[in-house]
Image (tube, rainbow, N blue to C red):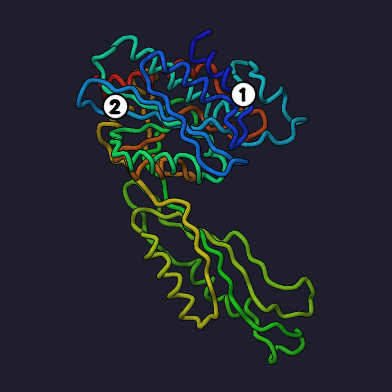
Amino acid sequence: MSAALSLTEQLIARRSVTPDDGGCQDLIAKRLAPLGFECETLAFGPDAFRVTNLWAVRRGRPGSKLLVFAGHTDVVPTGPLTQWTSDPFVPTHREGKLYGRGAADMKTSIAAFVVAAEEFVAQHGERCGSIALLITSDEEGPSVDGTVKVCEALKARGEKLDYCIVGEPTSVNTLGDMIKNGRRGSLSGKLTVKGVQGHIAYPQLAKNPIHLAAPALAELAAIEWDRGNEYFPPTSWQMSNIHGGTGASNVIPGELVIDFNFRFSTEQTVDTLKARVNAVLDKHGLDYSIAWALSGEPFITPRGALVESLDAAIRSETGVTTELSTTGGTSDGRFISKICEQVVEFGPLNESIHKIDEHVRVADIEPLKNIYRKTLEGLLL
C-alpha cells in the first residue's frame, strides 16, 4: 500500500464531523515534525465549539519562496447511516474506489500534501524553498474560527505567503482536468418590504407589499449586471425564498420578506451592487429594509508561476490538458487570497462530495501526490 493511500485511510477513520478535528491534525503534525516542520496549533472560538487549526512551516534556504498547502480536516455530517453501503468512517475498498466520509472532500488531498512534502524534503533537503501546511477544522461549518482567523494571525506576524494550493476537489471527469484559479464573490440580502395588513375584501384599507414589490423584483431579475470577463461568468442575482402572509387566505399581509444572493465577478464591488439594488427599490417607492451578509469577495490568480507550474505538473503526470475555472461556491481561498497573491485550488474528482457513499478513485491518489510534489519542484528548487 502506498504511503498516500495509507494516510488517506487513517484520516478517513477519524470521525471529524465539523468542527471536530478528530485527531487528524495531531496525526499530520507527528508526520511533519521529523521533517523539520515547526507545528503550531491555533485554537479559536468558545470552549464548547473550539476550532483547532494547524500551521506547520519548514523554512528553506534563506530568501526562498514559501508554498502553502491548505485544506480542512472537518467533514460534513454523514446523513442517514442506513443509506451508506459501508460505515462512512471505516475506509472501504470496492471496485477500485476508496469509500468514506471525507475521501474526496478533502482527506485524500491532505494525505497527498503530506506525502509529497515528505518525498520532496527527503530528496532535496536544504536546497529547497519553504513549505507550509495550513489545516483547519472549520471549513464545512460557519468558517469563522478557522482559516480566516489563521490568516489574520499570520498577517499580524508579517508572514509572507508566495503561493498557495487549496486541496479542494476540483477535477470533473478525470484527474487534472480543472484548476480553480479564483472564485466569485457571494453577497446575500434579506429584503423586507413593508405594507399594511388588512382584510382581503377591503384592499383600499390595506397596502399589499406583494403587489408593491412585484415590479421591482421583476426589474432586478431582468438586469444584466455585467458580462463577466476573461476569468468570470456574468454576475448573477437570484431569489431563493419569498415569504408573505399569515397563512389565511383572506388577509393581505403586512410585510413581504425575500432572500436573495449575488454571485459576482471582479467587474463588481459590494458597494456597487448594494447601490444598484437600492436604486431600483427606491425608484419603485418601496418602504423597505435590507440585511446584507457578505460571505466572500471574488479573487483571481491569473496565469503566472503557480498556475504554470501546476499545469505543467498535471500534464507531466497525467497527460491531461487542464482548464482554468472560477465556477462553484466559495472556499477558504477567499481568506488566503487576502495575504497571498497566487492562490489556486486543485484536487481529486468532485462527483461524490457531500453525498452518501462518498469516494475517491484509488488509482488517482498516487498521481495526485506526484502532481503536488512536481509543483513543489517547479517552484521551490
Q: Residue furthest top?
A: 1
Residue situated in front as seen by the camera: 24 or 91 = 24
Please state the horizontal and vertical placement of residue 50, each as a whole percent of the image.
57, 39
Identity of the residue drawn at 66% across and 67% down: 243
Identity of the residue drawn at 68% across and 71% down: 244
* Local secondary structure at mark 2: helix
- Residue on which disc 1 sits: 14
**Does residue 147 appear left or right of residue 158 in this picture?**
right
Check disc 1: other Cα within 10 Å, few if <14, some if 14-19, many if 20+.
many
Label at residue 309: 2
**Does residue 360 appear left or right of residue 367 in this picture?**
right
Q: Quadrant of the C terminus?
A: top left
Q: Amino acid at mark 1?
A: Arg
Report which quarter residue 40 is drawn in: top left
Please state the horizontal and vertical placement of residue 256, each as a whole percent of the image.
63, 73
Q: Say if residue 296 shows up in the picture.
A: yes
Sequence-first disc among 2 and 1: 1
Looking at the image, residue 48 lies above or below residue 22: below
Looking at the image, residue 89 lies above or below residue 218: above
Looking at the image, residue 82 lies above or below residue 291: above
Residue situated in front as seen by the camera: 51 or 176 = 51
Check disc 2: other Cα within 10 Å, few if <14, some if 14-19, many if 20+.
many
Identity of the residue drawn at 48% across and 44% down: 328
* Local secondary structure at mark 1: loop
Q: Amino acid at mark 2?
A: Ser
Mark-to-mark CA distance, 2 and 1: 33 Å
Residue situated in front as seen by the camera: 135 or 295 = 135
